[in-house]
Image: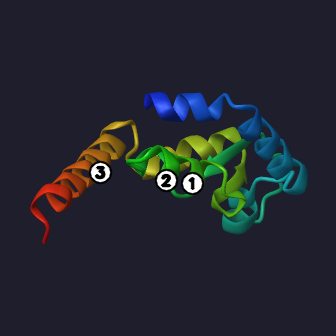
């Protein structure tokens, strides 16, 4: 689970609750099970294909959070597997975010 305070705020917003419900209503079956194995499984969760926590600014986080096309309807098992495969027990996302923050800082204060 993400520990980023901005992500936590966004995931509890009414906008996210509505978007999540819309995605599950439009895609009631796990997209990964269907695509990978041809198995029909009920989708109970929504995964952000491009992780919201990778963004540095709140505006970028909101763009990823609320972009319908950045969402995948999945079952719980697949959601866990996706995050395991991504190596995202938090360490990878934090490392990538910190690297982007450093790059932004260097660009802002030192240019090219």
Residue 15 sits in quarter: top right
**Count of marks overlaid on the render:** 3
Q: Nearer the viewer, residue 6 or 81?
A: 6
Camera-nearest label, 3 or 2: 2
Q: Residue 49: percent from the left, percent from the top?
A: 57, 57
Q: Is residue 55 left or right of residue 49?
A: left
Q: Position of residue 39 (x, y in %)?
A: 78, 59
Name the spot of residue 11 as percent of width and height, x first: 63, 33
Q: Regarding mark 3 in the picture, which secondary structure is present there?
A: helix
Q: Taking the image as drawn, is residue 41 in sight?
A: no
**Disc 1 crowd, CA 10 A, few/some/many (<14, 14-19, 20+):** many
The residue furthest right is 25
Task: Please provide percent x and percent y for residue 18.
Answer: 82, 40
| Residue underneath mark 3 | 96
- Residue at position x 66%, y 28% in the image: 12
Which residue: 64% across, 41% down? 77
Between discs 3 and 1, the one toward the N terminus: 1
Relative to 69, is 42 above or below? above
Compared to residue 89, the image places residue 47 above or below, namely: below
Q: Nearer the viewer, residue 43 or 18?
A: 18
Q: Is residue 36 left or right of residue 55?
A: right
Colour scheme of this structure image?
rainbow
Residue where numbered disc 1 is placed: 64
Q: Quadrant of the C terminus?
A: bottom left
Quick one: 80 or 107, which is closer to the camera?
107
Does the CB distance between marks 2 and 1 fall below 8 Å? yes
Asked whether residue 108 is in view, the answer is: yes
* Picture residue at 72% right of the left edge, 39% below the top: 16
Distance between mark 3 and mark 1 Cα atoms? 16 Å
Residue placed under numbered mark 2 in the picture: 60
Kindly check if marks 3 and 1 are in contact, taking CB atoms under 8 A apart as contact: no
């Amino acid at each position: 689970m993400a520990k980023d305070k901005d992500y936590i705020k966004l995931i509890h917003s009414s906008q996210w609750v509505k978007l999540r419900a819309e995605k599950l209503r439009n895609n009631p079956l796990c997209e990964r099970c269907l695509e990978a194995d041809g198995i029909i499984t009920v989708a109970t969760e929504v995964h952000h294909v491009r992780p919201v926590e990778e963004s540095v600014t709140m505006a970028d986080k909101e763009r990823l959070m609320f972009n319908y096309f950045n969402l995948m309807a999945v079952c719980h098992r697949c959601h866990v597997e996706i995050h395991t495969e991504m190596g995202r027990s938090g360490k990878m996302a934090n490392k990538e975010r910190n690297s982007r923050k450093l790059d932004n800082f260097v660009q802002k204060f030192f240019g090219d």
